[in-house]
Image (cartoon, grey):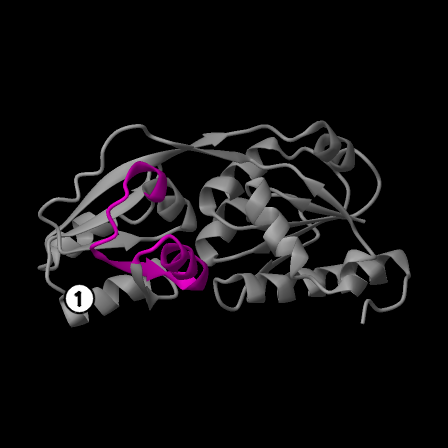
């Protein structure tokens, strides 16, 4: 069976590295990123702001390349984004596990602003606009692009082959690209990090779809382990544990 990783290569490798050896013994990993993250050249207008909002590690990494200013606190979504911001030198705190949790937390705390949301060119939820409408002054700036990529040759071969394919999907935009590209008839087993990421996949002809109980790598790893066990039962092979 195949484990098809569609995140950018470095993030995919970090995820694969956390999977148990017994799982990795059962799968052939294929790396086929469906998004290419490219910084948008220019300056970040940080002057006059009281804090930053990061909703992805990609935003942190792009910001770190564009500015050396680390004077503002950073309100982050999720453990990975928070850790990435802290490593880059910001005074980072996890303000919510999801964007909705961060939204509620910031409204409750009302930190001194205005705040600046540094995000990708394609962003869901209109976070800055919604916070501003709710009484906080929040601006946003797109600092990176998410360019769509096709499946790699190896991924296409797996899609058109005869072995089960397990594909963890980590964002709604990746999910939409995956659904648009997929045309295989092999048993397809999907793990989505959230309901939003699952939505574009629901019209596909898949064997099963699991949604992570919480939107983080640990829960996605558990979902993948369950899918590997399921695929092994289909193949008539013993348990991965």
- Neighbour tally class for label 1: few under 14, some 14-19, many 20 plus, Cα within 10 Å: some
* Residue 224 or residue 12, whichever sits in front: 12
Report whether residue 123 is seen: no
Report whether residue 119 is seen: yes
User: Where residue 95 sits: x, y (%)?
Assistant: 30, 66
Residue 7 lies in magenta, yes or no? no
User: Where residue 115 sits: x, y (%)?
Assistant: 16, 53
User: At 17% across and 48% down in the image, what residue appears?
Assistant: 129
Residue 234 horizontal side relative to residue 224, left or right: right
Q: Which residue does the numbered mark 1 point to in the structure image? A: 107
Residue 77 lies in magenta, yes or no? yes
Q: Is 119 placed above or below 76 here?
A: above
Residue 204 horizontal side relative to residue 176, left or right: right
* Residue 33 or residue 64, whichever sits in front: 64
Q: What stretch is highlighted in magenta?
A: 64-90
User: At 35% across and 53% down in the image, what residue appears?
Assistant: 55
Position of the C terminus, as image quadrant, is bottom right
User: At 83% across and 44% down in the image, what residue appears?
Assistant: 163
User: Where residue 79 sits: x, y (%)?
Assistant: 43, 64
């Amino acid at each position: 069976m195949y484990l098809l990783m569609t995140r950018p290569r470095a993030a995919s490798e970090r995820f694969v590295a956390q999977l148990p050896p017994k799982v990795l013994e059962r799968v052939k990993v294929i790396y086929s990123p469906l998004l290419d993250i490219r910084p948008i050249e220019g300056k970040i207008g940080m002057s006059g702001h009281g804090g930053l909002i990061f909703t992805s590690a990609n935003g942190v990494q792009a910001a770190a390349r564009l500015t050396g200013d680390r004077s503002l606190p950073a309100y982050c979504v999720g453990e990975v984004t928070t850790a990435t911001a802290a490593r880059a030198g910001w005074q980072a705190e996890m303000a919510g596990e999801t964007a909705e949790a961060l939204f509620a937390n910031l409204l409750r705390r009302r930190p001194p602003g205005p705040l600046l949301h540094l995000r990708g060119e394609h962003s869901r939820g209109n976070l800055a606009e919604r916070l501003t409408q709710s009484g906080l002054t929040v601006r946003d700036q797109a600092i990176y692009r998410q360019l769509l990529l096709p499946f790699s040759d190896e991924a296409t071969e797996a899609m058109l082959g005869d072995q089960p394919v397990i594909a963890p999907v980590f964002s709604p935009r990746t999910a939409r690209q995956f659904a648009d590209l997929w045309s295989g008839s092999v048993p397809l087993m999907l793990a989505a990090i959230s309901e939003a990421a699952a939505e574009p996949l629901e019209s596909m002809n898949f064997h099963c779809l699991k949604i992570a109980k919480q939107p983080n790598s640990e829960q996605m790893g558990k979902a993948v382990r369950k899918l590997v066990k399921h695929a092994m039962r289909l193949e008539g092979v013993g348990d991965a544990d």
